[in-house]
Image (cartoon, rainbow, N blue to C red):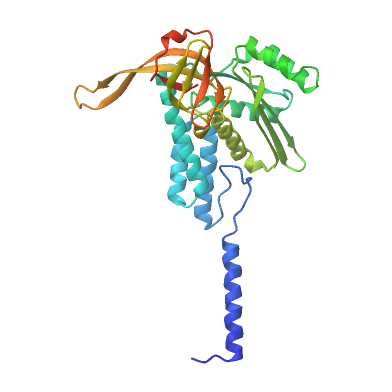
Amino acid sequence: MKYNKMSYLLILKFFFITIFLTSCANKKVQLASTEDVLEIPEKKREVDFAKEQTHLFKGCGYYLEGKPDKTIEEFEELLKINPENKKVGIALEKIKNYAEKIILLKESGAHPLRLAVININEDNKFSKRVSERLLSSLIGFGRFEVIERKELKKLIEEMRLKMLGIVDDEKAVESGKLVEADILVFCEANENKETKKSEINVRAINVGTGRADFSRVIRDINEDEVSIKLLNVSMDLKQNYPVIVGEVAEINQKENEIIINRGLNNNLREGLLCAVYREGKEIFDSKTGESLGKLKELIASNLRVKKVSEKMSTVLIFNEKISKIKIGDKVITR
């Protein structure tokens, strides 16, 4: 078939229009940063977009209220509408995996980390609301034990002085030890009513090491993004204190240390607290014969990761008898 000059021009025009429309269709409404797990869904058909957005915000709301089961339900409904929403799929998988590991942590008998969330700007209602929602999201899974507000009065006052440069990190850590906290989380949020933009600043200090474990600052947040951004911060903070299970590979009684078969490859890092437990007899259902799991005995709960290599780590034992621990015992970060 032969084409004249006009035919070629029409073909080229159609080709470039197709490329333009395809690029427009693939462009997302990118309201969240590339580091975030979640973002506002891409607007497709009006009805689907509205439903998808509703499930997203309801799921985020439940997460910040400390209701992971409800969050999972909402995100699963969202994926029925839009199975291609990869970020929600990733978030859902993380939440489910985290919830399963928390069950294992509880079964081990290990005491959860004691955590305090401190709102630096006590006079700011927006900052107070953000801090309270962050706290709810952190304790909802049972990963942390929250320190009551009345125990924090002195600590909060010292944190205010710290922000003014009067109290240093060392003093803050000393205050954390007084209330027997493992983690201090400082939260500050500010809202610009004119621009309708807000900023959230979250920082966590490991009381045992005296070092900052986590820091996240998010600026220029739109009103409808606050819940999603806060959920991302909460998820990142939880992942910063992972639940990792390994085994005792070697015991050094002289140094009061053990070597475990988990390291950098398993996201283990220095400063994390651990517990040791021993698996016992496996129990079966008398009617169905189904395995109900193994009995677990807590052996020691005061351990801290001292040194981390690629495939193994050295864990220091304090205020515990190392003689109770055996090779093959389970070690879990708490």
Q: How many marks?
A: 0
> In which quarter of the view is residue 181 placed?
top right
- Left or right, 49 with respect to 20, comes to left
Q: Which of 165 and 124 is in front in this view?
A: 165
> In which quarter of the view is residue 24 placed?
bottom right
Q: Is residue 235 above or below residue 22?
A: above
User: Horizontal and vertical percent for residue 166?
Assistant: 80, 17
- Left or right, 197 with respect to 288, comes to right
Residue in the image at 63% along x and 18% along y: 207
Residue in the image at 71% along x and 36% along y: 199
User: Horizontal and vertical percent for residue 16?
Assistant: 61, 74
Q: Nearer the viewer, residue 130 or 142?
A: 142
Q: Is residue 90 above or below residue 21?
A: above
> In which quarter of the view is residue 116 placed?
top right
Residue in the image at 42% along x and 9% along y: 324
User: Horizontal and vertical percent for residue 41?
Assistant: 55, 50
Q: In this view, does 51 lie above or below 298?
A: below
User: Horizontal and vertical percent for residue 70?
Assistant: 46, 34
